[in-house]
Amino acid sequence: MSMQALISGAECATTSNPLSQVLKHAEGDRSIQRVRVTAGPSSSLYRLPPSSSQAPSAADLAAARQFFEQQQQQSRGPALPSFDVERLRNMNMSPGGHATPPPAAVDMAGAWQGAARPTFSPQLTPGGSHAAWASEFELHRQTASPSAQTAEPMYRPSAFMSQRQFQPYMPMQSWTPPVAVSGKGKGRMTDADFDAAFAALSTHSSAKIEEVDELTEGLQDASLQDNDYMSEFQKSWEEVKKNAANNPLSQPAAEELARWEAQFNQLNSESRLDDDLDYDKQLQEAYEQSFNQYDIHEPGVRIGEDGVPDFGAYQFEQDNKYMVEDAQSRSFLAEARDLLANNGSLTEAALLLEAAIQKGDTGKGGYEAWVLLGETRSMDEREEAAMKALAEGTRLAAEAGDPTQGLMSLAISYTNESYERASYNTLLRWLKARYPGVEVPPPSDMQSPWALHAQVQDAFLAVARGQHTSGAAVDPELQIGLGVLFYTDSQFDKAQDCFETALGANPNDYLLWNRLGSCLSNGSKPEEALGAYRQALELRPTYTRAIYNVGVACLNIGAYEEAAKHFLSALAMQETGNGGADGAGNDKSAQLWTTLQRCFTYMNRNDLAEMARKAAPVNSFRLEGFDF
Amino acid sequence: MSDLKEEGFQASEVLAAIATSFAGLSDDEKKAQIKKVNAIFELQLKNGSGKTGTWTIDLKKTGSVYKGPAKPKADVTIIMDDATFCDLASGKLDGQKAFMTGKLKAKGNIMLATKLDSVFKSAQGKAKAKL
C-alpha cells in the first residue's frame, strides 16, 4: 500500500479512519496465526524462533509483521473509529482535557491513535479540526509515559506472539494492555519531538497534495539513505528498536516519520509481493502435513437403508488411448468381447469397454457393456470400479426388463468388500427376479440386524430344496447365491459344497474355480485352495484376481517370497493397460499394493514395503530379485 | 496399549491385541478399513464378578481402540458379557447367534453391529481371499 493510496482515496476525506485501508490489508493476512493454529509440531512454521535475532529474514518479517498487526488491531480494538469521532467532537467542545477520563489503557490507545494519525496522513484531516488535534495531542502528552518506559515493550514482541499462538480466538480487547503499551512504545518520541512534528504537520496538512507528495518522496529518500537502519530492521525488529533508541533523540522529526513510513511500506510491500506467496505454499504444506498426520479419515461412503454403498458415478480412465483413435467404424464392444473370449488382457478389455460406453455403444439392452465392464473390473481386482459399473449395469438391466443381469456379480463384489447387507439385498433382488413366483417370508425378527441374512438364506434354500425334490435341473446361479450366503456367514464348508455343485454344471467356469478356492482359503485350507486356483488359471491365465488369491494363500501359509511374486505379477498384469512401461496414467489396484506392502513387512523388508507404499514401477522390483 | 487392559476383563487383552493390529496397519490399509466400516463402536462389557467396563473401537475417525465411552458419540453401543466378547473375537461365536440367544444387545444403529465380525476378522491380520 502506498502513501498515495492512503491520502488520495475518496473515502479518506470522510470521518472514517484513513488507516482503515491499512487495517483491511492487515486483517486479510492472518496466515501466520492460522498456520500456528492448524499446523502440527512438524510444521516448519511452528518452529519459528521465539527470538528473531538469529533467524533469517523471512522469520523476522513474519514476527515483525505480526507485531504490526497487533498494533493495528489495537488501533481498531479499544479505540474504534466511532469512538474516535465522538472523542474529537468532545475535544472540540472542551479542549485541554475531559471531565471523566476513561480507563488508562483505552485512554492511551485513543491518544495513541490520535498521535498515529498525523504521522501517517497528516494532510487528511480537515483544517477545521486542528483544534481537536491539538487537544488530542495535548492529551497524549498528559498520558504518555516517560520515554525510558515506553521503549521497554519493544523488547517483548516475541512474548506476545508466543501467547497469541496458543490463544488465537482471544478477543482483541483482552490484549489491550500489552498492545496499548507497545503502541505507546511506538511513539517513543519525546514531547518536544511531538511538538515539533505536530507543528510541521499542521502546516503541511493545509498544503497542496503535490507538496505532500514531494514530502513523501523526500521522506522515502531519506529512509533509503539510512541503509544501516534498514538492514538492521531486516535482521531483527528487536535490534532495530535498540538501534533506534541509541539514535539521538534530537533527530529531526521528519526523519523519524520517514523511518516509520518506510518500515510500514516495506512491511506491506514485501509481505504482499513475495512473502505472501511463500506463506500460501507453506500454509498448504503445513495443512497437508497435519492432515496426513492427524486425520486419516476420508469421508466415509454413504450407505443406504438397504446397506448399499453409494460410490457415486463410474469414473472413466483419463486418456483412454481408444478414445483418441478415430474409430467410428470399429465396435469397441465387439473387440472387448473378443479379447475377453481369447484370454486377452483384462485391463485392455476394460479400456475398450469404457470407450464403447463413452461412445454410446452399450450393447444389448443398454446394459451389456456396463455389466461386462463391471465383471471385467472385478476379475482384474478393481472392486470399487466393478461395483460402480455393476450398479449402473443392473439399474439399466432392470429398466430394460432383464433384471437378473449383473446382480449376482454385484452381490459378490459387495461380499468381497464386506458390504454384507448390500449383498443380501442384491441376492434377494436376484431371487425375486429369477423366480418371480417364489414368496419370500418377511424376516423373523425385525429387531435383529442379522435377520436379513437368515431371511434371504431361507428363501434360497427353499428354492434349492424345491428343485431337488421335484427333480428339476440344478440352477448353478442359485447355488452360487447360496454359496455366497454361506460364505458371508463363515460357513465355508457349506459354501464349498455350493460352488462344487455349480462347477458340476459348468466345469470350465474359471470364476467358479476361483470362488471355490477362495472358500477353501478363507476356510483355513489354503493348500487345497491352491489346487482350485490352478484350475482357474489354467482356464484363464490373465485372471488377476486368481493370481492375487494365490498370493493371499501363500501369505497365509507363510511363503512370503512366493506371495510377493504373485502380487507383483498381478500388478504387472494391470500394467499392460494404458500407460505403458512407465505406468503413467495407470491406476493399479490399491488392494494389491497394500497386500504386497504387508507381505514385505512380514519379510522384514521395510525398504521394499516403502516402495510398495509409493507404488513404485513394478519392474523396479525385478532388480530386487523378484522374478515374476 | 497397556492402558487398555483392566484386571478381571479378559476382553481387555483381546482389545489390546486389536489395538496393536490397528497400529500395525499402514495408513492405506487403515483408510480402507475405515472406509469399509465407517462406524464407532462402544462396547459395554460385564465381567463374571458383575463389574462393568467400557471400551471404544473407532473405525470412523482415527482407527483406534481406547478405554472409556466413545468420543464423539458412538454409532452403535454393544452390550455383552466379557466371555461373550472373547468368544466373538476368537470366532467361537458369531454375532448373529449371540444376538439371537440374547447374549449380545445393541443400541443405536444396530445394523452396524454386523460389522463387528469383520472388525475381529481383519484384526486377526489374515489376508482374505476374494470370490
Image: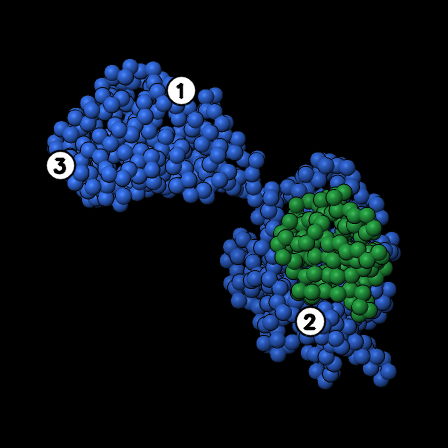
Residue B17 in sight in this render: no
Residue bearing the label numbered 3: A127
Q: Could you tell me residue A521's position as x and y percent?
A: 82, 56
Q: Residues within 10 Å of mark 1 (few under 14, many from 20)?
A: some
Is A330 displayed left or right of A191 in the figure? right
The answer to which of A316 and A138 lies nearer the viewer is A138
> Which chain is green in the picture?
B
Picture residue at 56% right of the left edge, 62% below the top? A313
Name the residue type under label 1.
Glu
Q: Residues within 10 Å of mark 2 (few under 14, many from 20)?
A: some
Q: Chain of mark 1?
A: A
Q: Chain of mark 2?
A: A
Asked if marks 2 and 3 touch (Cβ < 8 Å), the reply is no
Residue bearing the label numbered 2: A425
Q: In the rendered image, which quarter is residue B82 located in?
A: bottom right
The answer to which of A314 and A60 lies nearer the viewer is A60
Residue B74 in sight in this render: yes
